[in-house]
Image (cartoon, helix red, strand yellow):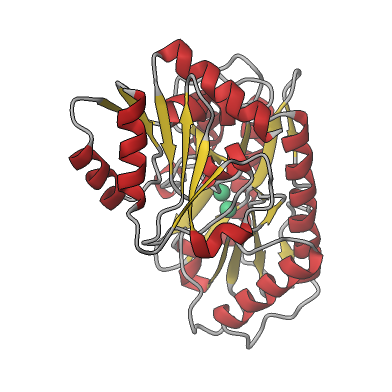
Amino acid sequence: MYRNRIERAQQIMRERGVDALILGPGSDLLYLTGYNIHSSERLTALLVFAHADHRLYIPELEASRVTDPSLSLVIWKESESPTKLISEELAAKGVQTIAVGDQLWSIFLLTLQEDIKHVRWIPASTILAPMRLIKTAEEVEFMKRAGKVADRVWERILTIDPRGLTERKMAQIVSDLLLEEGAEDIAFNIVASGPNSASPHHSPSSRTISEGDMVIFDYGGPLMGYNSDITRTLHVGRADEEELKVYKAVKEAQQLAFLAVKPGIPAREVDRAARDHLGSLGLDKFFIHRTGHGLGLDVHEPPYITPDSDLQLQEGMVFSIEPGVYIPGKFGVRIEDIVVVTQQGAERLNLATRELIEV
Ligand code: CO
Ligand code: CO
């Protein structure tokens, strides 16, 4: 799989006149090699040439982490400068155009740019983003399984009485459930209760969840590197009329956006389906973000489902549909599913109930 991906990247590089590609730690490196490593001051970098073999520069103390024998390693010692080794190699090959990973730390790029003059630098996403944008059947399968993990976690959250728990404690429980159900890691985890639910990217706090709260849960974690991302909103005790009205509006907006998805339409039409519905109910001013984002090895990646995106949807694209309404000082509601574009329309990768549950 990885060999094919590198060959495909080399083919695109040759088509675009790009001689070399440099990737630091991050999702592009993971995509091309399967190697997952944190960013640090010790540089790990994949160097791919359009017309020659690739190599992975790696610090000596991490070399034993690499288990794939097909990756040709350049192991650098603590006394060596990896950027110097890389720039020497690039100079020896006489490269003219270099694509640099979007996630490579600027300190490494600035050092390379000091060493290598008179070349053209471009972002690696121009080569890799189009590859990652369309998921293969295998990638979709990983994401379906990740989605099922998230769904099972929601079923289990609904069995817990949240009264008296802090948001932070509840988030800890959600993290434990994610790992128990099969996630490899926690990608993110939002628990936002009461007035905090009106803040879309709230960090779980010491606030105690209590009777009358709306509570937004938004969490995800990877399986085979591919992430899940689900949002559900529940109510503690009986919801009042305004809460029920807002919840219904968001649920309908989410469904209308889902029904709008089909290959060949611009992404903005999916956003519009949700936004227009909320607008017809006077709630669009409280919908303060885009309708969705792509998902894969990164939690946020193309395609972005925004009001002005002309990007044409294609079979195999995977993204979230997550309209929300946030009434400052009062409460918020968001409902999010991941969908994959199919030949006919879209398929949800999350099947957990979207009904308002009063716990
Ligand atoms: Co989410
Ligand atoms: Co999301």
**Residue 33 appears in which quarter of the rendering?**
top right
Report x, y in % for residue 180: 79, 70
**Residue 113 appears in which quarter of the rendering?**
top left
Residue 5 visible, this orientation:
yes
Query: Observer-nearest residue: 320 or 90?
Result: 90
Query: Observer-nearest residue: 89 or 42?
Result: 89
In the image, residue 259 above or below residue 230: above
**Left or right, 347 with reference to 322:** right
Q: Residue at x 31, y 37 (%)?
A: 88
Question: In the picture, which quadrant includes the C terminus?
Answer: bottom right
Report x, y in % for residue 31: 59, 39
Furthest residue toward bottom: 164
Q: Residue at x 70, y 32 (%)?
A: 340
In the image, residue 172 above or below residue 320: below
**Left or right, 195 with reference to 259:** left
Report x, y in % for residue 265: 57, 16
**Left or right, 341 with reference to 126:** right
Report x, y in % for residue 218: 60, 60
**Left or right, 19 with reference to 258:** left
Q: Residue at x 23, y 45 (%)?
A: 110
In the image, residue 296 above or below residue 214: above
Question: In the picture, which quadrant includes the N terminus?
Answer: top right
Query: Observer-nearest residue: 138 or 209?
Result: 138
Residue 321 visible, this orientation:
no
